Amino acid sequence: MANYEPGQDRNVAALNILLMCDGFLIMKKLTREEKFMKLALKEARKASLKDEVPIGCVIVKDDKVISRGFNKRETKKDVTSHAEIEAIRNANKKLDNWRLVDCELFVTVEPCIMCMGAIVQSHIKKVYYGSSDPKGGAVSSSINILEAKNLNHYPSIEGGILEEECSTIVKEYFKSKRESKKIKLG
Ligand SMILES: [Zn+2]
């Protein structure tokens, strides 16, 4: 029950309950998938600090993170340096193997055609992503690469893990880019 002081506005008391509920939601226990997505988000923030589109990725094997990566396209001036490719390269080195069988990939944004190609080629078992990418997503938004026939591997896919958080970080990045452009022009 609301513990409002005598004479306190009922609306204020109701608001307190809402704030308590909100606090509860923030403190709710994260699922296994959300915990790994949080680590991918940490990578995305590293990209943001380097003025790169904030997308991050981690690769997990036997419930342990074996590799991390974030978008470095501008830093490396390399079109292939998406977060997933960076993480896949690191995992290949770590396992000394191009096959990433029994590995799971967590990425904050739906993978593009190039990254889905690398995911299929490396035999990654499952892909979890945060927010969808209507312009370039190759899982469901733009095209679905898994509808291609006769691939030698079809990873499982699950989207919408911490979707809001994954989408907000990208939106905020583009918003601040637009604002700094306006300041320069002004
Ligand atoms: Zn990509």
Image: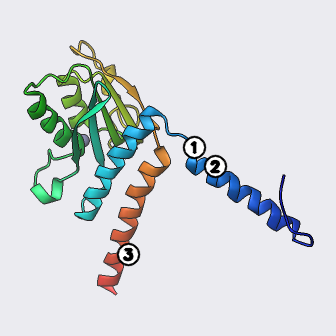
Three-letter amino acid code of the residue under disc 2? Phe
In the displayed structure, 170 sits above or below 39; it is: below
Three-letter amino acid code of the residue under disc 3? Glu
Q: Which of the labelled discs sits on residue 179, or is there none?
A: 3
Is residue 2 found left or right of 39 in the rendered image? Answer: right
- x and y percentages locating residue 155 in the rendered image: 31, 21
N-term mark: 2 or 3: 2
- x and y percentages locating residue 37 in the rendered image: 38, 41
Query: Could you say whether the residue bearing mark 1 is in a helix, strand or loop?
Result: loop
Q: Are marks 1 and 2 in contact (CB under 8 Å)?
A: yes
Residue depth check, mark 1 versus mark 3: number of the one nearer the observer: 1
In the displayed structure, 124 sits above or below 159; it is: above
Q: Are marks 2 and 3 in contact (CB under 8 Å)?
A: no
The foreground one among 129 and 145 is 129
- x and y percentages locating residue 116 in the rendered image: 25, 31
Residue depth check, mark 2 versus mark 3: number of the one nearer the observer: 2
**For residue 47, what is the image quadrant?**
bottom left
- The residue that appears at 26% across and 20% down in the rendered structure is 102
Ligand 1 quarter of the rendering: top left
- The residue that appears at 48% across and 34% down in the rendered structure is 31
Q: Quadrant of the C terminus?
A: bottom left
Q: Given the current orientation, which residue lies at the most extreme bottom position?
A: 186
Q: Which residue is identified by label 1?
A: 28
Is residue 4 found left or right of 70 in the rendered image? Answer: right
- The residue that appears at 13% across and 59% down in the rendered structure is 75
- The residue that appears at 10% across and 51% down in the rendered structure is 78
Is residue 26 found left or right of 51 in the rendered image? Answer: right
Q: Which residue is identified by label 2?
A: 24
Query: Could you say whether the residue bearing mark 2 is in a helix, strand or loop?
Result: helix
Three-letter amino acid code of the residue under disc 1? Lys
Residue 78 in view in this figure = yes
Between the residue at mark 1 and the residue at mark 2, the CA separation in whole angstroms equals: 6 Å
